[in-house]
């Protein structure tokens, strides 16, 4: 069962799109270190920071 963006939590395994990869929609996998978007939803995905390399991007899928 996939979680929705409103249920996003620290430690979740996610796929994000980095700002540099927005045109190609290339996805990066990792675990959520910090949730940066205050709202529970966002049309382009909530912005998060990953544990792996402190990468920042918008969540596309919660794995």
Image (tube, rainbow, N blue to C red):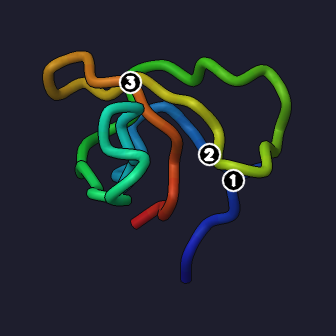
Q: In the picture, which quadrant includes the N terminus?
A: bottom right
In the rendered image, the residue lying farthest to the bottom is 1
Q: Secondary structure at mark 1?
A: helix
Q: Position of residue 49 (x, y in %)?
A: 40, 22
Q: Secondary structure at mark 2?
A: loop
> In this figure, which residue is indicated by the disc labeled 2?
8
Instruction: Choose top left, top right, bottom left or bottom right for residue 32.
Output: top left
Foreground residue, 18 or 37? 18
Residue found at x 27% / y 24%? 55
Q: Are marks 1 and 2 in contact (CB under 8 Å)?
A: yes
Residue found at x 64% / y 47%? 45
Residue found at x 32% / y 58%? 24
Identify whether 51 is placed above or below 6: above
Q: Image check: 59 left or right of 50?
A: right
Binning the other alpha carbons within 10 Å of mark 3 as few (below 14), some (14 to 19) or many (20 upward) gives many
Q: In the picture, which quadrant includes the C terminus?
A: bottom left
> Which label was assigned to residue 5?
1
Q: Image check: 63 left or right of 7?
A: left
Q: Secondary structure at mark 3?
A: strand
Give the Cα separation between the discs numbered 3 and 1: 16 Å
Q: Earlier in the sequence, mark 3 or mark 1?
A: 1
Binning the other alpha carbons within 10 Å of mark 2 as few (below 14), some (14 to 19) or many (20 upward) gives some
Q: Position of residue 37 (x, y in %)?
A: 70, 24
Residue found at x 14% / y 20%? 53
Q: Position of residue 52 (x, y in %)?
A: 16, 28
Give the Cα separation between the discs numbered 2 and 3: 15 Å
> In this figure, which residue is indicated by the disc labeled 3?
56
Q: Image check: 51 left or right of 32?
A: left
> Which label was assigned to residue 20?
none
Give the Cα separation between the discs numbered 1 and 2: 5 Å
Depth check, mark 2 against mark 3: the one in front is 3
Identify whether 60 is placed above or below 36: below
């Amino acid at each position: 069962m996939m979680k929705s963006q409103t249920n996003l939590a620290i430690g979740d395994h996610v796929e994000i799109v980095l700002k540099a990869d927005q045109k190609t929609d290339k996805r990066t996998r990792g675990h959520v270190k910090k949730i940066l978007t205050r709202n529970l939803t966002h049309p382009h995905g909530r912005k998060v920071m990953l544990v792996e390399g402190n990468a920042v991007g918008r969540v596309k899928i919660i794995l």
